[in-house]
Image (tube, rainbow, N blue to C red):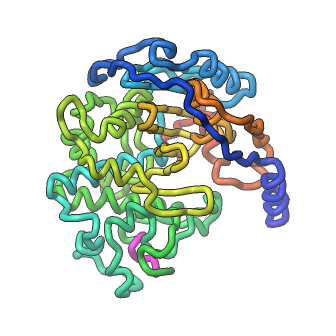
Amino acid sequence: MNRIAVVLAIVLVVFYPTQQTLGFSQTSLESYDQAPWPTEVWSRTTPEQQGMDSTELERMSEHFERNEIQVDSILVIRNGWLLYEDYPSSFGPDDTHHLFSCTKSITSTLVGIAVDLGYIESVDSAVLDFFKEYDFSNPSYAKEDISIRHLLEMTTGLSWNEEHYGEDINDYNKMLRSDDWVQYVLDKPMKSNPGDDFYYNSGASHLLSAIIQEATQNTTLNFARSNLFQHLGITDIEWDRDPLGIYRGASRMKLTPEDMAKIGYLYLMNGTWDRTQVIPQDWVQTTSRAQVQVDETMDYSYQWWVIEDLGAYYASGWGYQSITVVPEYELVLVVTAATIDASVQVESLLRRWILPSLGLEASEIEASFTIPPVLILVGASPYIVLAIAYFMERKGLWNLDKVE
C-alpha cells in the first residue's frame, strides 16, 4: 500500500493543476444600490443589474455539468442581491447541507461575539484556565501558555496528526472515538511552542466550542441562536455534539445555502446586520487578513482561509463547501458540493469565472484535472469513506449523519 501511495502522489504532482498567477485589470466597476436586508428573504435580481456578466456565470455551471462534477448549489451575491443561483443536483434551496469544516468559521464567529459580550476576557486568555477541573497528561509550561488565539490560528504547538484520515494514526479519528474530546486534545504532548508553527487541528476548533460553553454557562448552539442566528433570521440549524454534549466546534453543522450566504454577508457588512453590530468590527478586520502563513501559497486567519492577492477570505469544508467574501467587489459566494475537483476550489472559482464576470481581465488558466475515483480508492485517501457514504445517501442506502 505504501508503494501505491507513492505512485498516487507522483500522479497528483504531475497532473494536478497549479494555479497560475493571474493579473486582473479593473475595467468598469460602478457603484450599485444595496439590497434590503435578507433577514426574511434574499432580494433577487439579474447579474447584469449588478454589473456582472451572466454568460460567465453560466459557463461556470456548464463546466460542472459537462464534467460531471458534483456541485449541489452555487450562490452569488453582490451588494446584498442574490443574482445567481444554481441547484444542479438533488439538493434544493430549502435543504440543509453539511458544512463540514465551514463549521469552524462559525465557531470562530461565536468566539468573537463572546469576547465582545464579556464572557471571554480576551483571545489571549489561557486555554487551561477554562478546564481547571481536568488533570491533563504531559503537563508543561508551554501547554499552560496556549491561548484562545493559538486555537483560532491553529498554532497551539500540540502534537497533532490530521493528515491521514483513513488511518489509525489520525488524531481526529482518535478524538472521535474517545469518551472525552477535550481530555484527548489537551492530553497531547507539545511539539513546539505555542504560536511557532501551524498544524491543522480540528481538536483545537472543538476546544473553542467547549470554551464558549464553559464561559457562557450555556450550550454553544443556544448561545449561537441568541447572539448570531436570530439576528440573521436563521432558524433551520442542525449540529451534532460530542459524547459529553458539547457541540462540535470543527464540523457537523448543517445550514441551507442561503443561510450560509447570510454568514458571509454579515462579514461583508463588517459585522453589522440591520443597524445591529452582531460581530465586533475589529474581529471582522482581523479575520479578513492573514494571521499565519501556512506555506508559500496559503494563509490562515481566525478559522478562515485568506487569499491576500485577491482581497478574499473564505470558510472551507470537505468536498469544497465554501463561504467566500470579497469586500472590494461587494461579493459573497457560496458553494456546496461533494467533490475533490480542483475547479471548485475557491481561488479557481474566483479567477476563472467570478471576477471575469465583473469585467476584470485575466490571463488564461490551465484546465482543471479531475482525479478519477479509482485513484481515491487506491490511495486510501481521506475521502474514501465520505465519498462512498455520500453516494449511498443519495441512493437512500445510508445516512451521512452517521459518517465522520
Provide the residue span drawn in magenta: 184-189
In the rendered view, does 360 fall on the left or right side of 45?
Answer: right
Q: Give percent across and percent down for residue 95.
A: 44, 25
Tell me: 86 left or right of 120. Answer: right
Which of 293/181 is in front? 293
Residue 221: in magenta span: no
In the image, what residue occupies the spot 41% across and 76% down?
194
User: Which residue is rendered at x = 33% and y = 48% of the image?
Assistant: 284
Percent position of residue 44, x then y: 40, 14
Q: Say which residue appears at 66% left-offset and 41% top-offset.
A: 22
Residue 384 in the image: above or below residue 232: below
- Farthest bottom residue in view: 140
Res 314 visible: yes
The chief SS type of the magenta part is helix
Foreground: 118 or 401? 118
Q: Nearer the viewer, residue 160 or 75?
A: 75
Q: Quadrant of residue 395?
A: top right
Residue 62: where, in percent of width, then height?
68, 20
Report the label total.
0
Task: Determine the image quadrant of residue 140.
Answer: bottom left
Up-down relation of residue 387 to residue 245 (above or below): above
